[in-house]
Image: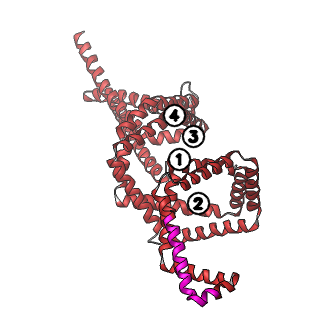
Amino acid sequence: MNGSAAAVKARELAKMKRVALALLATVTLLFVLARLQHGAGVWGWVAAFAEAAMIGALADWFAVVALFRHPLGLPIPHTAIIPANKDRIAGNLAAFIRDKFLATDTIVRKLRAFDPAGRLALWLQQPDNAALMAGKLASALAGWLDFIDDARVRRFLAASIRGRLKDLDLSAMSGKILDALTADDRHQEVLDAALARLARWLDDPDVQAAFAAMIVEVAGKEYPKVLRAVGLVTDTEEFSRRIAGSIVRGINGWLHDIGDDPQHPRRQAFDESVAEFIERLKTDVDLAARIEAAKRDMLAHPAMAAYLNGLWDDMKTWLRSDLQRADSHLAARLRGAAMAFGATLATNPALHDSLDDHLQSAVVALADDFRDGLADHIASTIRGWKDEDLVRELELSVGRDLQFIRLNGTLVGGAIGVLLHALTLLAGRAG
């Protein structure tokens, strides 16, 4: 309970105590006045009312006070009930909350009625809510960057990553990855794309001119006499362009043949080479050893550590700079992703049901441990309170309402006193 709320409740409790005390003082004064009049006339009725009202007020005062402390500080048995039974109250309250509010079937029923997936979908589709979530995620990312920036954390992460990489069987893992990449002839699609790209490149006149120049240059260095002899017959540059064109046309024709024929021998040779390489990655001890040695050398090389640190520092600098901007690209992407997810969740029943089902499964899996842990926490917290702290908290929470018991006891007692006085007079007349 915060200080301001506690102060308000304390003032209300004190006010009700004064009202109850004032009513007791009033009926006591009436009783004294009635006795001074020896109960003559109407004073007999007043005396009967006041006497019973005093008894009722005192009895209920005793009952209310006995809940929290010993009345007048006297160690009367069965008083200060709450402090005396604090441990039992703590256990019973914790068990009540656990069994009545946190039972697994109760939580699951409430979760289904709440429809978390539907509510999340509607919430995320609101631009302000999506922006709020994006801002929270961006703030969390900024905090994570600060955490990673700590030199001790960076050393720990670097050592952990290096240790993982050292233990990684790169050869076997590469084989498995290539197995997945070549399933259903997906590597042939890559080959087709590469062949088409190479053919387009060779069709470029600039590329052909570069080939021609290369032929002239190589021939001038390696076969100067042949080149001079050719120059006697025709222009060497024109001759080189023709040669380059012929070479390019021949290569392009070959590439198109491979691309158009799924059963081309070169495709089959490519398949066999890929399959053989994958098998070697998974089974060849010597190849695995060479890959492992290369991996160790790479990890141990200072340039690699400097390179990775430089990449991380550049990425971190960019992220921090972007997150500090009002028009952050990352925050905008996160906002867009949140709204898109909300729209998909709203229109995709399968995704909606899947999310609800997973949440329900998580609740079922965690509910027992959670509710037992929460019950233990409640019980241990209450047991750990000082008696005066527990009494103060409870009295502030329900003490104002308990003062109405004192008021009602005073008035109801007075009414009973009047009724008994009336019955006494009737019995006397009848006698």
Q: Quadrant of residue 426?
A: top left
Name the residue tied to disc 4: 365
> Where is residue 67 shown, x and y percent of the image?
50, 31
Q: Using the numbered discs, state the Cα–Cα distance from disc 3 to disc 4 in whole angstroms.
A: 39 Å
N-term mark: 4 or 2: 2
View extreme (bottom): residue: 232
- Badge 2: residue crowd in 10 Å (few <14, some 14–19, many ≥20): few
Asked whether the viewer can see residue 323, the reply is no
Say above or below: 218 vs 186.
Answer: below
Q: Using the numbered discs, state the Cα–Cα distance from disc 1 to disc 3 in whole angstroms.
A: 73 Å
Q: Amino acid at mark 3?
A: Glu
Name the residue tied to disc 2: 144
Q: Which residues are magenta?
A: 229-253
250 falls in the magenta region: yes
Q: Amino acid at mark 2?
A: Trp
Q: Amino acid at mark 1?
A: Ala
N-term mark: 2 or 1: 2
Which mark is in front, 1 or 3? 1
Name the residue tied to disc 3: 388
Kindly state the secondary structure of the residue where label 1 is placed: helix
Say above or below: 102 vs 127.
Answer: above
Q: Quadrant of residue 336?
A: bottom left
> How many numbered circles does the render carry?
4
- Badge 1: residue crowd in 10 Å (few <14, some 14–19, many ≥20): few
Kindly state the secondary structure of the residue where label 3 is placed: helix
- Badge 3: residue crowd in 10 Å (few <14, some 14–19, many ≥20): few
Majority SS type along the magenta span:
helix
Name the residue tied to disc 1: 183
> Where is residue 179 shown, x and y percent of the image?
58, 47
At x 55%, y 53%, the residue is 265
